[in-house]
Amino acid sequence: MAPDIRCLNYAAYRAEVVVQDNTLAYAQNIHGMWDIDRYVNLLMGEIPRLTDDADGYGPRGKNFIAHVDVPTEVRAAHAALQPVYGTRAANPAFASR
């Protein structure tokens, strides 16, 4: 018999981002965390992928993930940051073939 295997996956911490001296910053220092520009760049790529539309990874797009409701506040923040950070392009080395 195969052993029972249980896989747990969760965020190890919650990073709060604030505006400080007219720029984005972490509310508190998180040991080992990416610099703020890298973190925001990664998040900017995730929002379009989570959006369940023709370009997203949901059922109405690539159908890789279940439907995700992206809150209005998150969509608004993404739209406000888009002109500054753009959207991170996927690395073609990891594309489905």
Image: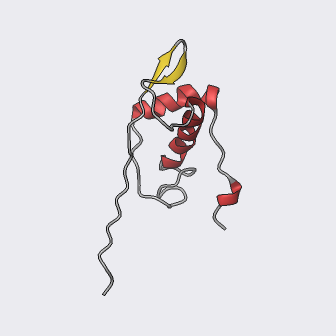
Q: Is 49 placed above or below 37 here?
A: below
Occupied quadrant, residue 84: top right
The residue lying toward the viewer, choosing from 20 and 56, is 20
Q: Picture coordinates of residue 73 (x, y %)?
A: 41, 30
Q: Is 6 placed above or below 42 here?
A: below
The residue lying toward the viewer, choosing from 92 and 24, is 24
Residue lying furthest right in this view? Answer: 92
Residue lying furthest top in this view? Answer: 21
Residue lying at 48% horizontally and 55% vertically, measured from the top left = 58
Q: How is the image coloured?
A: secondary structure
The C terminus lies in which quarter of the figure?
Answer: bottom right
Residue lying furthest bottom in this view? Answer: 1
Occupied quadrant, residue 6: bottom left
> How many callouts does the rendering have?
0
Q: Picture coordinates of residue 89 (x, y %)?
A: 66, 45
Residue lying at 41% horizontally and 58% vertically, measured from the top left = 66
Q: Is 23 placed above or below 41 here?
A: above
Q: Picture coordinates of residue 62 (x, y %)?
A: 55, 59
Residue lying at 53% horizontally and 39% vertically, measured from the top left = 43
Q: Picture coordinates of residue 25 (x, y %)?
A: 51, 23
The N terminus lies in which quarter of the figure?
Answer: bottom left
The residue lying toward the viewer, choosing from 34 and 54, is 34
